[in-house]
Image (cartoon, grey):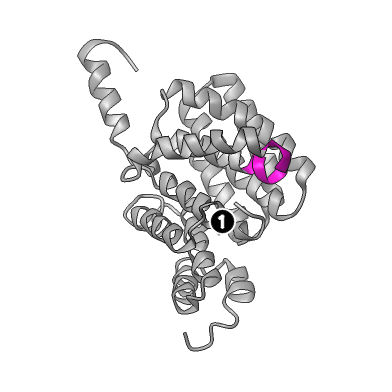
């Protein structure tokens, strides 16, 4: 989770048990629900590289959640915070990122309590704590082990929730080698996350998370000298979303005939 990489989801008795098992069996893509207008708006701002608008969307989501306390909205809100904080860090707007991170950690803690430590939320919490490390290096002795614990606890759910693989990949990719980082191993986690998303509704539904995760893998390929693989992903995204002109203008140059 370094700056450059960011440019780059109940009742009683038997009925309760059936519903709970159904929820636990869903991939993360099934958890983004009930907020279609927000999803479409966030996606539109994402592909137009107009991330400044996300702050206003988050504020409206917060107001709606304060009124209705709806779980699906809270879920989407937490992941929207995650995406926007990554953008602020990439822009080196650390003060704003820290302010948003306080709110994101508070909301994700509520979500963790509601969903009883489910894998995707554990991974999300680990990722948010990773942001805290980026923003406040002196917190590493306390926050680092906590983030690692969340991410490791999430790994039993890798086959269900793509972000469990993403956060393990982030940990391995951005940790220095002498501290246990392994870029090639990280790529296998990113590939698992993308493969899961390719089969999920988030791709046909045009969700920003799908594109963002593919770009994360492309960045990892590029950083490890696998330019041809990165270029194939860029080409695929340009076909998937022609309006994201910044991929062609900023990321694809240099691919040549790859």
Q: Secondary structure at mark 1?
A: helix
The stretch in magenta equals 131-139
Q: From the viewer's perspective, is residue 155 above or below residue 23?
A: below
Name the residue nearer the viewer: 206 or 174: 174
Can residue 233 be seen in the rendering of this structure?
yes
Give the main secondary structure of the magenta stretch. helix
Question: Which residue lies at the image location 48% right of the left edge and 35% below the top edge?
Answer: 149
Does residue 173 belong to the magenta stretch?
no
Residue 138 % position (x, y): 73, 39
Q: Residue furthest front?
A: 178
Q: Is residue 135 covered in magenta?
A: yes
Residue under numbered circle 1: 178
Residue at the image position 28 percent from the left and 10 percent from the top = 12
* Residue 172 placement (x, y as % from top left): 50, 53
The residue sitting at 33% across, 38% down in the picture is: 156
Closer to the camera, 107 or 220? Answer: 220
Please provide percent x and percent y for residue 20. Answer: 29, 24
Asked whether, in this view, residue 138 is left or right of residue 125, the answer is right
In the picture shown, does residue 183 fall above or below 159? below
Say which residue appears at 27% left-offset and 17% top-offset: 16
Q: In the image, is residue 124 above or below residue 257?
A: above
Residue 72 higher or lower than 49, as above or below:
above
Residue 88, percent from left and from top: 71, 49
Q: Is residue 34 visible?
A: no
Category of crowding for the residue at label 1, using alpha-carbon neighbours closer than 10 angstroms: few (below 14), some (14–19), many (at least 20): few
**Marker count (numbered):** 1
Q: Nearer the viewer, residue 180 or 123?
A: 180
């Amino acid at each position: 989770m370094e700056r450059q990489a960011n440019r780059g989801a109940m009742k009683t008795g038997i009925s309760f048990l059936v519903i709970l098992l159904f929820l636990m069996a869903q991939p993360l893509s099934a958890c983004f629900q009930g907020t279609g207008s927000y999803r479409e708006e966030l996606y539109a701002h994402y592909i137009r590289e107009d991330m400044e608008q996300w702050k206003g969307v988050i504020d409206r989501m917060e107001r709606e959640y304060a009124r209705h306390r709806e779980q699906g909205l809270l879920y989407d809100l937490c992941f929207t915070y995650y995406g926007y904080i990554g953008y602020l860090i990439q822009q080196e707007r650390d003060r704003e990122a820290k302010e948003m991170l306080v709110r994101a950690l508070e909301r994700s803690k509520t979500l963790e309590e509601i969903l009883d430590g489910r894998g995707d939320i554990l991974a999300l919490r680990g990722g948010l704590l990773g942001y805290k490390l980026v923003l406040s290096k002196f917190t590493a002795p306390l926050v680092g082990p906590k983030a690692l614990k969340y991410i490791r606890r999430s790994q039993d759910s890798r086959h269900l929730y793509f972000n469990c693989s993403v956060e393990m990949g982030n940990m391995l990719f951005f940790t220095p080698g002498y501290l246990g980082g392994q870029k090639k191993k990280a790529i296998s986690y990113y590939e698992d996350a993308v493969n899961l998303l390719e089969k999920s509704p988030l791709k046909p539904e045009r969700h920003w998370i799908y594109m963002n995760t593919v770009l994360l893998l492309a960045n990892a390929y590029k950083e490890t000298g696998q330019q041809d693989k990165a270029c194939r992903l860029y080409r695929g995204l340009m076909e998937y979303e022609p309006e994201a002109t910044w991929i062609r203008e900023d990321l694809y140059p240099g691919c040549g005939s790859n």
